[in-house]
Image (cartoon, rainbow, N blue to C red):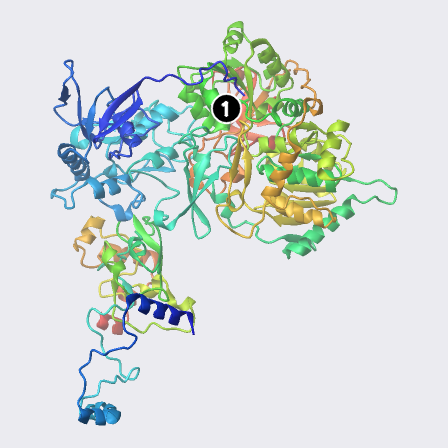
């Protein structure tokens, strides 16, 4: 007799309850009682006539619900500067300690996000992430959002620690890869109020001067990319 | 120790009884309401109030309802809430804080709303976010929603006050903690309130009145109250006490958040004060250091060097694995191989040659290692290597100093304390610059400004001494003893007051006869002596016996009885009898090829005036225990890596004689010097017994202090004669600036920017005599230093240069110490 049985018995005796168990289900009549051994086949039989719900994953990938909590994404402002300011509020909010951030100063030669501060290191450990979305709620600049991508498996632990370049949103139309200066005459507040709508000539000129090979420059964009926007 | 018998057993203190939130509390008369509330566990929100600063009543956040008995004895309430940080308690007062008074709560909420009107609320990018009193108190005492819809005041941000300190005026709540600290504590006022009303701001002084006087910092800086470029050694404290993120440091800017950091209490390794610090680290890397509160030592403050100089230990030249020289190259090997190679090399290099003569071994350990490490070094030297050639003084030394340390410092326990130094009516500084060489000692002395007479024996009145209101006792460098002998009668009288202190610095060893002269003054006046070295490990090394003539506890190595007592405690038959040589004698001997093996730990070659390169080259075998690839490590045959202070535990003994033990902040597999030496001794089959800090401390405790018969005799030395300078020469004066190019300040450009530009100082007469123009070249046979000249009111015939500042490395370039005769020429 195991220890837990003892406890059970002792508790029973203490409660003064009966030893026997009495079900709350209604008692069946004699006919159903006789059919009981094959009643399970009824379930199968019933489902022959219902539509199938099996998903043909991975051959067919069904879209998720629009607010599905998938892989994170670090968004950009319309001119290509990063929205992340490296404030670490996402890391602070994270109940699973899955996010690691290190910030640094923006300099005139290396302006990654609007304002003084940008996230130099940004890592999300998908072995730890529980996809609760508290980081998204904490983000003060809407830099961090979640995509619907759910295919997050891999053969190595290292591979499941996503770095900043893995998380950054793709370059959209009119966007110029950071670093480059802010739109002249704007502040970080202007970016926050969505007054910046795209890269301006000064920024394009700056990137042309400093990184003529940059693929996001208008002349370096392929027709395919330009069409995709 | 001070005699406490003459003081009454219990001091009678006038007390006042009042009621705070219905709780009766009795506190000493003159207590502020906010402090009385703290005593009964009632917290009143505040920004400007700081226990170490004078009350200001600037932020108005601490408003409470107060009622006190009127002349008729009836309780009369004040018509409006009062600031509890400026009002002292009175008998029968009734105070209602925000907890019990709606009026007080409403007032506090109103003040908070006004403070936040112009606050940018950029907490996500602010370094203070997460540990910000404004953030916390806005959450606890503020409105959940803002009612202010207009445009906030904006300023350019950030405004660099120096290369290290950045000011963001938008975030400032005008509490004036920084300006009060600068004026009251450090004496380097550099910012102050400007304008009125909504435009009121903390601002810098007018830059148009810049008057270069030789105290300009290396980096860009604003102008201070005196119209001089701001250069403070204590400015980092303003960052720590700022209750918002208005003052931030460039070194920690955007580095991390408080929840990232693991905080470990520790002790600063930078000076002999043993300041309590807090090391904040993340993932094995130190990110910042803060002052810890230790009322008997550093109070709430530390120097900028203590705060910002920590990058050196994680630079790319850090040694993590043992290195052995193979075919002329240092290659990484395993610990057993390196230890075996080191032992074999030392044995071979010190073995007798065919003619039966052998070269000895010597141990050099800079004054930076802990008590335990110093003990292990000297025990290894005496037990394993059989020599007294062990010295922890990587600086100028003298036998007189050693006799002084043995007879009056080692094993004497707690001597003059910080508190006694602060209360001393007269303090005479000899060979000691409080600001440059003392760190927080300067702040303690300045605390008594106006109540204390400070005299300094120096070639000129430095700016630090000026800030102490010090009087200059002019002395030619190296001839301080004569200045002491000729001390004016009124100074001697001042020193006769009870509690007067004479402070001897590490440079007292550069002036023959200084210790003798100081002892004579002590005998005549009854003043007390304090020896304040510069480096953190100096006092510990003296206690541990890491000096050629001293065994642990102040026992003299040349006395048979003392030697036998130590030999018995160590379980060895005998200790070496030959007289030991000091650092400079060892280097000299080694340069002539007279040393077989050398074990060097924690020494910068550039601190020594001797020819270290030749000495290392001609020594048979060199073992270096180092954190980083230093000059000496590069020349060594075996390099054993040791842990920097944040990665080990141990004890520094500060200049008071106070034990300052610290625990490991960051756990790594790096080993302390004492553990490495214990392993090394096993190669000889010797159990050194220094594997752990506990083992060393147990041995030291068992040994105890020397009895009076085991100590060396009082110092005896003749003062140096009058300096004979010819035309075109001058006596060299020099000391280390607090922020300079010392090895422990490497890798911190922002701190280096606050260090002072190197200049040569001389009097107008000297400058005319040597034909100095805007610049001057100071030279010896070994080399030349060229520096801009600053004409200073000082002793004639003397040229002063900083010891190790940018462009002025005296020991390496001139191979000279203070008191030497140098050639001075005008330069273009």
**Nearer the observer, B673 or B84:** B84
- Is residue B214 visible in the rendered image? The answer is no
Looking at the image, residue B571 sits to the left or right of residue B666; the answer is right
B818 versus A80 height, above or below: above
- Subunit under mark 1: B
Foreground pick, A129 / B320: A129
Crowd around label 1: few <14 · some 14–19 · many ≥20 (10 Å): some
| Residue A119 appears in view | yes
Total numbered badges shown on the rendered structure: 1
Label 1 secondary element: loop
Q: Residue furthest top?
A: B489
Q: Please state which of residues B477 and B729 is positioned toward the viewer in this rendering.
A: B477
In the rendered image, which quarter contains the N terminus of chain B?
top right
Q: Name the side, left or right, on which B461 lies relative to B670.
A: left
Q: Which residue is mark 1?
A: B417
- Please report the residue visible at 57 percent of the width from the left and 38 percent of the height from the top: B370
* Horizontal and vertical percent position of residue B386: 76, 39
Examine the image and state in which quarter residue A29 appears.
bottom left
Residue A70 falls in image quadrant? bottom left
Residue in view at x 28 percent, y 66 percent: A15
Q: Position of residue B375 (x, y in %)?
A: 64, 37
Residue B327 % position (x, y): 70, 55
Check the image and name the residue furthest to the right.
B355
Please name the residue shown 70% across and 43% down the image: B617
Compared with residue B828, is residue A213 higher up or lower down, i.e. above or below?
below
Of residue B83 and residue B741, the one placed in the foreground of this image is B83
Residue A41 versus residue B377 in the image, above or below: below
- Residue at the spot 87% in from the left edge and 41% down from the top edge: B356
- Quadrant of res B518: top right
- Residue B276 position, x and y percent, is 46, 35
């Amino acid at each position: 007799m195991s220890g837990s049985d003892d406890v059970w018995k002792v508790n029973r005796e203490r409660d003064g309850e009966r030893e026997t168990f009495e079900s709350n289900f209604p008692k069946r009549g004699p006919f159903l009682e006789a059919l009981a051994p094959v009643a399970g086949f009824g379930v199968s039989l019933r489902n022959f006539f219902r539509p199938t719900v099996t998903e043909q994953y991975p051959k067919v990938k069904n879209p998720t619900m629009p607010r599905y909590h998938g892989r994170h994404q670090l968004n950009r402002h319309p001119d290509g500067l990063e929205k992340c300011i490296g404030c670490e509020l996402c890391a602070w909010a994270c109940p699973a300690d899955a996010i690691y951030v290190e910030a640094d100063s923006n300099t005139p030669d290396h302006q990654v996000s609007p304002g003084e501060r940008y996230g130099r290191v940004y890592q999300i450990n998908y072995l730890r992430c529980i996809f609760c979305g508290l980081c998204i709620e904490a983000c003060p600049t809407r830099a961090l959002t979640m995509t619907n991508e759910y295919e997050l498996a891999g053969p190595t632990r290292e591979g499941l620690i996503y770095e900043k370049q893995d998380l950054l949103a793709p370059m959209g139309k009119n966007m110029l890869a950071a670093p480059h200066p802010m739109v002249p005459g704007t502040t970080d507040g202007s970016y926050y109020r969505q007054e910046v709508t795209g890269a301006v000539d000064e920024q394009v000129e700056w990137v042309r001067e400093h990184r003529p090979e940059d693929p996001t420059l208008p002349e370096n964009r392929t027709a395919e990319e330009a069409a995709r926007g | 120790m001070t005699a406490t018998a003459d003081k009454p057993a219990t001091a009678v203190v006038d007390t006042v009884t009042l009621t705070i939130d219905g709780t009766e509390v009795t506190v000493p008369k003159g207590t502020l309401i906010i402090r009385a509330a703290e005593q009964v566990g009632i917290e009143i929100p505040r920004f400007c109030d700081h226990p170490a600063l004078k009350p200001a009543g600037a932020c108005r956040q601490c408003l409470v309802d107060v009622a006190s008995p009127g002349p008729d004895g009836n309780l009369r309430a004040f018509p409006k809430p009062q600031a509890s940080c400026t009002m002292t308690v009175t008998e029968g007062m009734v105070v209602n804080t925000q907890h019990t008074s709606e009026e007080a709560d409403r007032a506090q909420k109103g003040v908070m709303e006004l403070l936040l009107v112009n606050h940018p609320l950029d907490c996500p990018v602010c370094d203070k976010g997460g540990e910000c009193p404004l953030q916390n108190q806005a959450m606890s005492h503020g409105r959940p929603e803002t009612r202010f819809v207009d445009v906030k005041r904006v300023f350019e941000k950030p405004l660099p006050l120096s290369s290290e300190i950045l000011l963001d005026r938008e975030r400032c709540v005008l509490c004036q903690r920084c300006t009060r600290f600068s004026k009251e504590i450090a004496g380097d006022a550099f910012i102050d309130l400007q304008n009125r009303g909504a435009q009121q701001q903390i601002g810098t002084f007018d830059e148009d009145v810049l008057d270069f006087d030789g105290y300009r910092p290396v980096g860009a800086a604003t102008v201070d109250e005196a119209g001089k470029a701001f250069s403070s050694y204590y400015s980092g404290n303003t960052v720590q006490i700022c209750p918002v993120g208005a003052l931030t440091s460039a070194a920690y800017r955007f580095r991390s958040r408080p929840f990232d950091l693991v905080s470990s209490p520790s002790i600063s390794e930078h000076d002999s004060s043993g300041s309590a610090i807090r090391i904040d680290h993340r993932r094995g890397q130190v990110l910042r250091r803060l002052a810890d509160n230790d009322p008997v030592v550093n109070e709430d403050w530390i120097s900028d060097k203590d705060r910002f100089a920590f990058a050196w230990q994680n630079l790319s030249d850090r040694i993590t694995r043992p290195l052995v020289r193979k075919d002329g190259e240092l290659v990484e090997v395993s610990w057993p191989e390196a230890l075996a190679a080191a032992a074999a090399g030392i044995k071979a290099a010190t073995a007798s040659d065919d003619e039966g003569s052998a070269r000895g071994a010597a141990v050099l350990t800079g004054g930076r290692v802990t008590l335990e490490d110093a003990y292990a070094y000297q025990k290894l030297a005496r037990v394993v290597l059989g020599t007294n050639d062990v010295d922890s003084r990587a600086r100028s030394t003298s036998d007189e100093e050693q006799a002084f340390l043995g007879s009056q410092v080692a094993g004497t326990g707690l001597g003059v304390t910080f508190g006694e130094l602060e209360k001393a009516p007269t303090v005479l500084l000899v060979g000691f610059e409080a600001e440059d060489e003392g760190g927080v000692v300067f702040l303690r002395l300045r605390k008594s400004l106006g109540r204390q007479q400070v005299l300094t024996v120096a070639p000129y009145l430095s700016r630090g001494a000026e800030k102490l209101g010090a009087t200059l006792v002019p002395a030619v460098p190296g001839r301080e003893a004569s200045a002491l002998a000729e001390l004016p009668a009124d100074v001697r009288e001042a020193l006769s007051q009870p509690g007067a202190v004479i402070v001897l610095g590490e440079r007292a060893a550069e002036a023959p006869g200084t210790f003798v002269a100081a002892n004579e003054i002590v005998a005549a006046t009854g003043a007390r002596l304090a020896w304040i070295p510069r480096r953190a490990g100096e006092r510990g090394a003296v206690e541990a016996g890491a000096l050629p003539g001293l065994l642990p506890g102040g026992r003299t190595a040349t006395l048979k009885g003392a030697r036998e007592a130590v030999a018995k405690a160590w379980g060895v038959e005998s200790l070496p009898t030959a007289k030991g040589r000091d650092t400079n004698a060892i280097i000299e001997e080694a340069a002539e090829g007279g040393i077989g093996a050398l074990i060097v730990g924690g020494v910068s070659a550039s601190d020594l005036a001797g020819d270290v390169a030749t000495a290392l080259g001609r020594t048979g075998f060199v073992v270096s225990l180092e954190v980083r690839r230093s000059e000496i490590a590069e020349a060594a045959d075996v390099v054993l890596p040791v842990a920097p202070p944040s990665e080990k535990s141990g004890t520094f003994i500060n200049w008071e004689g106070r034990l300052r033990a610290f625990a490991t902040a960051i756990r790594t597999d790096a080993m302390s010097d004492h553990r490495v030496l214990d392993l090394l001794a096993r190669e000889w089959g010797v159990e050194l017994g220094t594997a752990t800090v506990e083992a060393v401390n147990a041995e030291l405790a068992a040994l105890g202090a020397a009895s009076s018969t085991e100590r060396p005799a009082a110092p005896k030395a003749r003062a140096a004669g009058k300096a004979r300078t010819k035309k075109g020469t001058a006596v060299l004066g020099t000391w280390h600036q607090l922020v300079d190019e010392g090895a422990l300040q490497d890798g911190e450009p922002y701190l280096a920017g606050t260090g002072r530009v190197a200049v040569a100082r001389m009097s107008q007469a000297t400058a005319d005599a040597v034909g100095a123009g805007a610049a001057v070249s100071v030279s010896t046979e070994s080399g030349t230093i060229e520096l801009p000249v600053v004409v200073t009111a000082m002793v004639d015939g003397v040229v002063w240069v900083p010891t190790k500042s940018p462009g002025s490395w005296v020991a390496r370039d001139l191979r000279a110490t203070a008191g030497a005769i140098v050639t001075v020429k005008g330069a273009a």
